[in-house]
Amino acid sequence: RKEVEQDPGPFNVPEGATVAFNCTYSNSASQSFFWYRQDCRKEPKLLMSVYSSGNEDGRFTAQLNRASQYISLLIRDSKLSDSATYLCVVIGPFGNEKLTFGTGTRLTIIP
Amino acid sequence: NAGVTQTPKFRILKIGQSMTLQCTQDMNHNYMYWYRQDPGMGLKLIYYSVGAGITDKGEVPNGYNVSRSTTEDFPLRLELAAPSQTSVYFCASSVPGGQNIQYFGAGTRLSVL
């Protein structure tokens, strides 16, 4: 089983719709969780951290489910500019020097 | 601040050639990383460094070498280029502790023919 697994997509979603995707992780002792965004042929950038209590940043909501070992990302009122690949990232359990990246979920917002 | 700067942006190598990918950061970050990203794949960690003079292997270190003589610079060396090393290479830096948020360079696209 991969350490971090994501549905590669692509998810093709009409503008204004709500879209959600999940990421599962294999090590129950993992410590920290993040979503990074990567535009086509660009470098990844941090989108948001994922906290146990869930967190929201504008149209984006991230959730962590430790019991089922997955994190989720919800995007409301999707914009054309949300088209990108979303990378799930996990840290731990032994120290925070190394990050494990998922392969990414590709999202395309359709006008 | 320029952030993390990688050079070159593109390079084509012949099999067996060697080259050094340069990475420098001006944020005084202790941690630095080299990743490779193959098409449709996630980032794979090649090497990382938690400070000047300290380096450690990641998931896919074979065929690569690194050094960290200063806080700012973390070059990646390919000694005998192979077609399997065709990839996009990203350098990143971060601050130790906390969430280890990674700041990436723009990447180097390398083709080995």
Image (cartoon, rainbow, N blue to C red):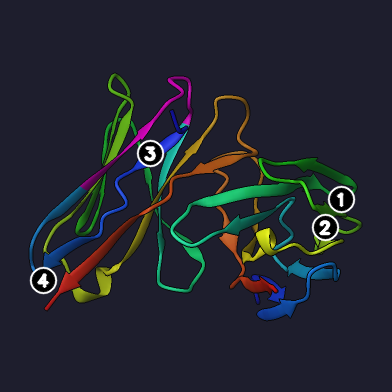
Q: Inspect the image, locate mark 4, and give the three-letter code of the amino acid beneath it.
A: Glu
Q: Inspect the image, locate mark 2, and give the three-letter code of the amino acid beneath it.
A: Thr
Q: Nearer the viewer, mark 4 or mark 2?
A: 4
Q: Are marks 2 and 1 in contact (CB under 8 Å)?
A: yes
Q: Is residue B8 visible?
A: no
Q: Nearer the viewer, mark 3 or mark 4?
A: 3
Residue at mark 3: A5
Mark 1 — on which chain does it sit? B
Residues behind callouts 1 and 4 on a single chain: no
Mark 3 — on which chain does it sit? A
Residue at image coords 25%, 59%: A10
Mark 2 — on which chain does it sit? B
Residues behind callouts 3 and 4 on a single chain: yes
Residue A100 disc label: none
Q: Which residues are magenta?
A: A21-31
Q: CA distance from mark 2 to mark 1?
A: 5 Å
Q: Inspect the image, locate mark 1, and give the three-letter code of the amino acid beneath it.
A: Ala
Residue A15 disc label: 4
Q: CA distance from mark 3 to mark 4?
A: 26 Å
Q: CA distance from mark 1 to mark 4?
A: 47 Å
Q: Secondary structure at mark 2?
A: loop
Q: Are marks 1 and 4 in contact (CB under 8 Å)?
A: no
Residue at mark 1: B52
Q: Nearer the viewer, mark 1 or mark 3?
A: 3
Residue at image coords 69%, 64%: B83
Residue at mark 2: B71
Q: Inspect the image, locate mark 3, and give the three-letter code of the amino acid beneath it.
A: Glu
Percent position (x, y) of residue B97?
A: 62, 39
**Split into 4 quadrants, where in the image is the C terminus of chain B?**
bottom right
Q: Nearer the viewer, mark 1 or mark 4?
A: 4
Q: CA distance from mark 4 to mark 2?
A: 44 Å
Q: Nearer the viewer, mark 3 or mark 2?
A: 3
